[in-house]
Amino acid sequence: MTKTDDLILVLDAGTTSTRAMVFDRTGRQCALVQRALTQFYPQPGWVEHDAGEIWDATLACAREVLGRISEQGGGRVACLGITNQRETVVAWDRASGAPLARALVWQDRRTAETCAALREAGHEATVQAATGLLLDPYFSATKMRWLIDQVPEVRAAAEAGRLALGTVESWLAFKLTGGAHVSDATNASRTSLLPLALAKNGSTWDAGLCDLFGVPLAALPEVVDNCGAIGTTLAEWFGDEIPLTGMVGDQQSATLGQACLAPGETKATYGTGAFVLANMGSAVPRSANRLLGTVLCQVAGQRTYALEGSVFVAGSLIQWLRDALGLIASAQETEALARSVPDSGGLVIVPALSGLGAPHWRPEARGAITGASFATTKAHVVRAALEAMALQTHDLAEAFARDGARWTALRIDGGMSANDWIAQDLADMLALPVERPDFVETTALGAAMLAGLGAGLFGSLDEAAAAMRGTVRRFEPALDEGAQAARLELWQEALAKV
Ligand code: ADP
């Protein structure tokens, strides 16, 4: 069988669902299987997953997708890549391989007080300088400590030296390989325990940070490259042993899947929230504007970095219009409604429904709707909601520029990016070309590229991107500067009110 038959299996362990996909070397998606994941909300602000369910669903999806491939007449699966929801923490018993507690999901805010105490004690500057991250419950370290403090089974395992802690890729790698305890550098860079700068002896956790957060080094995985010979799946899972050759956090994966491989190249994913990452090359990024520094990828021991900013409310604003206000029946309707009026009639929506993310970082802020009059219609409200996407992105673009990462173009993906009106409005308000790939599964594609590189199907990430990334549609800026400035002014006025 020639190399062109080599297929790549990708497991995408997301927040709301788990998916398994198979790609060929040209980036064609040959099959996809998906399962929903149960969300547990035991208290306000708490969000949990069942790690056992994540593993069972992942295994079931992978087996089913491989079954479909063999029904289609096959091709050889050369390698496996994993991409995952980041920051979510799993605690398990190394000896039995069983989870010891529910997984604490990235959205979980239960460690807000711990973070506030660390901030008040003056630790934020040190943590940010070392890890690129702010002190926020979002990141893994305080969640790990919470599990040790609050769950007797986790504490007992720690005391007995049987505790394994990891993010979701680490958990899946452990199960798939039958015991490898590893985490890739992108996922590790979201814990608050990994220094951004490479240590002389390679990727390692920082003992001082582990002390500060109270996380035992012995429970942490080995930090590995994003691609290479990470492990091999046990024969009992898929019949054949499949080499695990790629692992990467979902946002970094999408950035690579969008081929943001050179400094300045930037992607924005518009889903429930919006995540923007800009490639910063090989220099450790420093933000003076409350953006996050993070590892974009680590290949052959060399790191490439990214600056990251996220907007909390993007597609969820459209869901709110639909479910809470009943203004629309489906998200798809918003495009025609926005086009049905020439402008928002002066209406501005500041979508701080769950606070404001980067560059404002004001979790306590709440939303505002300003400029309403008797002339305001449903179409104006919908248009203002869609306009809020480009306005929030514009603020992020300015923060990135102040941190030395001026965007040259913006590559978009995620469910909302299907809306052509939003894509054009982004181009207009940013005064930049906006590119949208025809194949929008960029998260899975990035993991496929890395796995392919790790298995030797490609010689470099550039080669993988050239082979696998398909065609894109470009939206060119068309709004005049006066109109752009007028909208920005209204936005700034509304922002000042929240
Ligand atoms: P996630 O991965 O965060 O679950 P998706 O990438 O699947 O999200 O995107 C879904 C979100 O995008 C939903 O919040 C939905 O309201 C929004 N959305 C989907 N299609 C459109 C559209 N055509 N116009 C505007 N918003 C949309």
Image (cartoon, rainbow, N blue to C red):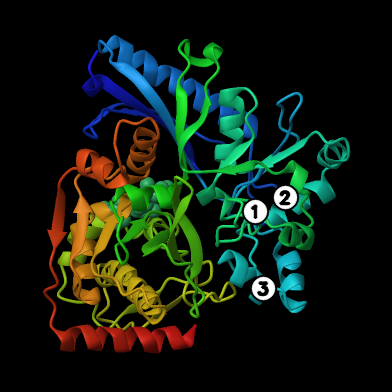
Looking at this view, is 35 or 310 the one in front?
Answer: 310
Q: Is residue 49 visible?
A: yes
Q: Is residue 351 left or right of residue 39?
A: left
* Mark 1 residue crowding within 10 angstroms, few (<14) / some (14–19) / many (20+): many
Q: Are marks 2 and 1 in contact (CB under 8 Å)?
A: yes
Q: What element does badge 1 sit on? A: helix
The residue identified by callout 3 is: 126
Q: Are marks 1 and 3 in contact (CB under 8 Å)?
A: no
Q: Name above or below for residue 12 compared with residue 96.
A: below
Indicate which disc residue 140 carries: 1
Image depth: mark 3 or mark 2 in front = 3
Residue 346, image quadrant: bottom left
Q: Amino acid at mark 2?
A: Met
Question: Alpha-carbon distance for marks 3 and 2?
Answer: 20 Å
Where residue 380 appears, x then y in whole percent?
26, 72
Where residue 407 appears, x then y in whole percent?
29, 71
Question: Alpha-carbon distance for marks 1 and 3?
Answer: 17 Å
Q: Is residue 329 visible?
A: no
**Badge 1 or badge 3: first in the primary sequence:** 3
Where residue 230 appears, x then y in whole percent?
52, 32
Question: Alpha-carbon distance for marks 2 and 1?
Answer: 6 Å
